[in-house]
Amino acid sequence: MSSAEFGQIAVNALMLSGILALVALGFSLVWGIMNIVNLSHGAFIVIGAYLTFGMHEFWKVDPFFSIPVSMIVLFCLGFLIQRSLINQVIRAPLLATFLLTFGLEILIVNLLNFFFKADTRSVMTPYSGTGFTLGPVRVPYIRLGALGVSIVLVLLLAAFLTRSRLGRAIRGTGMDIDAARLTGVKVTTIYALTFGIGASLAGAAGSLLSMVVPFDPNLGGGYTERAFVICVLGGLGNVVNVLIGAAVYSVIEVFVGSRLPALSQAVTFGILVLLLIVRPQGIAGKSFS
Amino acid sequence: MRRTLFSAVGLLLGAMTALAADTIVFGAAISITGKTAKEGGYTRDGYQFAIDKINEMGGIKVGGKTYKVALKYYDDETKPERSAQLFEKLINEDKVNLLLGPYGSSPTGTAAPIAERYKIPMVEANGSAESIFSKGYKYTFMILSPARTYLRGIIDAVLAKDPNVKTVAILGENESFSKEVAGGAAEYATEKKLTVVYAELYPTNAQDVSALLTAIKGKNPDVILGSGHLQDSLLIVKQAKDLGVSPKAIGFSVGPSSPEFSTNLGKSADYIFGATQWTEALKYNGEDAWKTPKAFGDAFRAKHPDYKTIPYQVAESAVAVIAYQKAIEKAGTIEPTKVRDALAALDIMTFYGKIKFDSRGVNVYKPMAVEQYQPDGKKYTVWPQDVAEKPPMYPMPAWDKR
């Protein structure tokens, strides 16, 4: 491997990890705080992608400017879904939430299929495919922008969770629901907020993905899987753990992909299985704190 | 609605004429519903269109007698195991004379042994996997250029423009059809004295091929060939542009022939080559009722105004019926084994290209056509040279020099 190729692969891995961190962050938040493995996370990502696509196609909105819209719409949707549906089964065994979110995924994907057809879509801007070169390494603007947006959102979320009263209430609920309730936290509202934030992060990830990959309504499934792997790799703990998981995952996917592409998924999941045997709590911590 | 009614009446009429003794009935199970419903519809429309044309022209002359032709089909719901049952039913209960293929490689694979068992020929137009023909079947014939030859036209077109091309990189989806395409392309490139500097497969539903493209960039190949599906081709072009991977030519087996290719890529689609079985723009001159692709396209549109462009599935399905027509005329009988021998010896030129089968029953003689998006925003058929619309544009300018 030449140093130029190594540099390019490292840059690719870094930029991939930005988007994947965003994908996994919402998933891990919901899982860590509410103990729900949200199988409809991928569907929220696809909704975000279609929102950006639609706004760009019909009103010529620059895809980066549509990210806040995606986030707000998905936040409201997530909030409502939690209050009206998931809250009904929140005390039921894990299987019930699995089934419910799995069903939601199918419902959303099929609705998207109905309204947008299964046609492949992409968001093409004048700056798509342009970039600058750093020695032998090429850095595409869109991927760099996506990385930037991811970093900003990750920092905002981290600040929100640690600095604000609401954020602390969310974390407190995740640590000990009874203690949180005793101190006057409205758990149902906190849960709805958490789910909404998770969905809005998925929306942002979807908006970014729509600029990077061609997609159709079935885009999301693969990303739910990736989010799951990243959470297990990193451990649920906190924002930093998710970042570690996303970075490790990206490095594996990109490096194996450049040498043995046909085996990239096998190797990634192989490492996951190994890690579960050796260090079941993930590379870093455990409960969301 | 009117079309449904129309085809229902057509079906009824078809079934009624099937009872008459002087009618040759072709039987087929086609995916009218299910995953490949759209393509199954193209197949049915192609078969029916050719059958109607033959009847309009008086039918098929066999010895001193003239036969009308009819189509008897069932919906296999895109389930290969269902199509096997339906072919049995067509042979045993409906007593059809000859068989036409279903849509897709896997149902064709399940139908072929049935044709073999009953010694009734099946001409298939929509299953390009060569694995079907490695089993020594004698009664199945494929009108299509097989998967292995899909990327040959692109290699030939590039070599014709630039004999100094030395290196090629091939990336394919890890799935049976795409693997056959990629393997065939590598073999052909080597045969043409090119060096295959990179050949790798990526997993189905890949979301990121930047790793492969980075490795390819290091090898600096003259040509990059991709064998996957539409989304993969779009992803490869987008990421090649992102990473500044600028070979002299990029070509795909699947993707560019679909209108979605240019709606997704816009100007980035320019200069990209795509393989296709057939286009309306080809300048073939055949000995069938339509003779040229353009005449076929116009006649088909006159009957089916809802088709804007004619999918190649329609053309290849129609030509399967024409192959039977020519073979029956030559055999001078409708006895299935005799028709089979006449098919095996067939050598004709049609609006779809040359039809001649090798010893396995595969039409390896028809070349794959090549389309290219050119900077005026249109897609042109650029290969084979002697029947193309326009010459190919080569080399592809670097992404940042456009």
Image (tube, coloured by chain):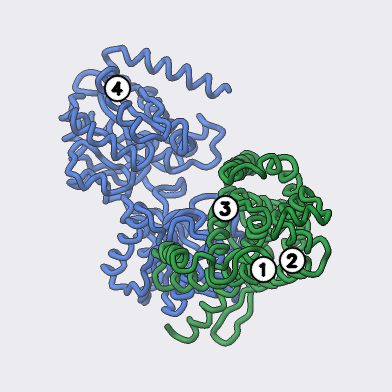
Chain colours: A green, B blue
Q: From where the camera sits, is residue A80 visible?
A: yes
Q: Measured from the top left, where is residue B15 in percent x and y?
A: 37, 16
Name the mark nearer the viewer: 3 or 2: 2
Q: Which chain does the numbered disc 3 sit on?
A: A
Q: Measured from the top left, where is residue B264 in percent x and y?
A: 60, 56
Separation of marks 1 and 3 at Cα, in angstroms: 25 Å
User: Mark 1 falls on what kind of element?
Assistant: helix
User: Mark 3 falls on what kind of element?
Assistant: helix
Q: Mark 1 points at which residue?
A: A239
Q: In which quarter of the image is residue B25?
A: top left
Residue type at tag 4: Lys
Q: Residue at x 41, y 58 (%)?
A: B173
Q: Look at the numbered discs 1 and 2 and tell me whether their residues touch, using CB distance below 8 Å.
A: yes
Pick the residue in front: B20 or A179.
A179
The label shown at residue A219 is: 3
Q: Measured from the top left, where is residue A53 in percent x and y?
A: 68, 54
Q: Residue at x 41, y 62 (%)?
A: A266
Q: Measured from the top left, where is residue B391 in percent x and y?
A: 45, 62
Q: Name the residue under label 2.
A: A157
Residue type at tag 3: Leu
Separation of marks 4 and 3 at Cα, in angstroms: 40 Å
Separation of marks 1 and 2 at Cα, in angstroms: 8 Å
